[in-house]
Amino acid sequence: MWTHPAWRGRFLAHPTPADERLRAYAGWCTAVEGNTTFYATPARETVASWARQTGADFRFVLKLPRTVTHERRLTGADEELGAFLGAIEPLGPRVHALWVQLPASFGPTDVPSLARFLRGLPAAHRYAVEVRHPAFFDDPGAARTLEETLGTVDAEWIPFDTTAFFRTPPTSDAEREAWTRKPRTAPRTRALTDRPVVRYLGRDDPARTVEGWQPWLDVVTGWLREGRSPTVFVHTPDNADAPELARAFHDEVRARLPGLAPLPEPAPVGPATLF
């Protein structure tokens, strides 16, 4: 996501043409979750516009279409997968990872299907898998089998950390909606590859979001010191402050690791003034 009504006039100039909004977002953050690709494969021309608006080092983590992961459950979806892979070609090296988000019903007995699917994917891309079945988090044997499967193709396991979000009951409409939809899984901080990806969900109160991500500061700093290149996505139920919070997380990591490059300086959003 690189546009949000709450960001207009605050993080993104308003009005900003639709084909320039990603460029504006890239002034705040250097990576984006491609969640819309889950619902529909974009036109190749649209993807070419994304490439024009971003530098070669910008990171897209693109979710595979739901027809592949949820409806076909990784089996018999060659046509849909091929169309998706063809559509995203204009992004080139900007595709940091293809995100295989699996339904909560996809459990340990389905891992052989995942193994076959991953083995059949083109080696030109990196892959990251998000599972939501409780057994992968509660059963060490199931977790070990999944890790071994991912390791055969150098794929990452994406943790979706909702610990801070579920710590206390919701207090806003956005939090109440997220309460019914987001997974409740145990936190996971083990990286399998040199490109770990983390999804973190805080609360609509920025202070509580910052409080909840404190354990990740040591984890991410450690990964960087090991030579890994992590990508961290910061969410809140309403996402109103997400770009600013992402930059705050980066600043906290950078305070521990001063050699980490700063994020770009965003372009001014407000109107020019002499006073």
Image (cartoon, rainbow, N blue to C red):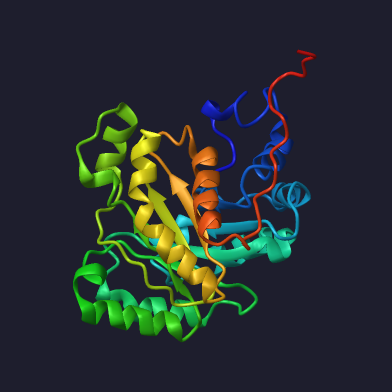
86 or 208, nearer to the observer: 208
**Residue 114 position (above or below residue 206):** below
Residue 169 placement (x, y as % from top left): 20, 37
Residue 46 placement (x, y as % from top left): 70, 47
Residue 30 placement (x, y as % from top left): 63, 52
Query: In this figure, what is the number of numbered marks?
Result: 0
* Left or right of residue 127, residue 259 in this image: right
**Residue 139 position (above or below residue 56):** below
**Residue 181 position (above or below residue 223):** above
For the point 46% across and 77% down, the residue is: 117
Residue reaching furthest to the top: 275
Q: Quadrant of the N terminus?
A: top right
For the point 72% across and 42% down, the residue is: 23
Whether residue 130 is visible here, answered yes or no, is: yes
Residue 176 position by quadrant:
top left
207 or 124, nearer to the observer: 207
Residue 199 position by quadrant:
bottom left
For the point 36% across and 80% down, the residue is: 147
Residue 179 position by quadrant:
top left
Q: Quadrant of the C terminus?
A: top right
* Left or right of residue 70, residue 127 in this image: right
Whether residue 89 is visible here, answered yes or no, is: no
Residue 69 placement (x, y as % from top left): 42, 63
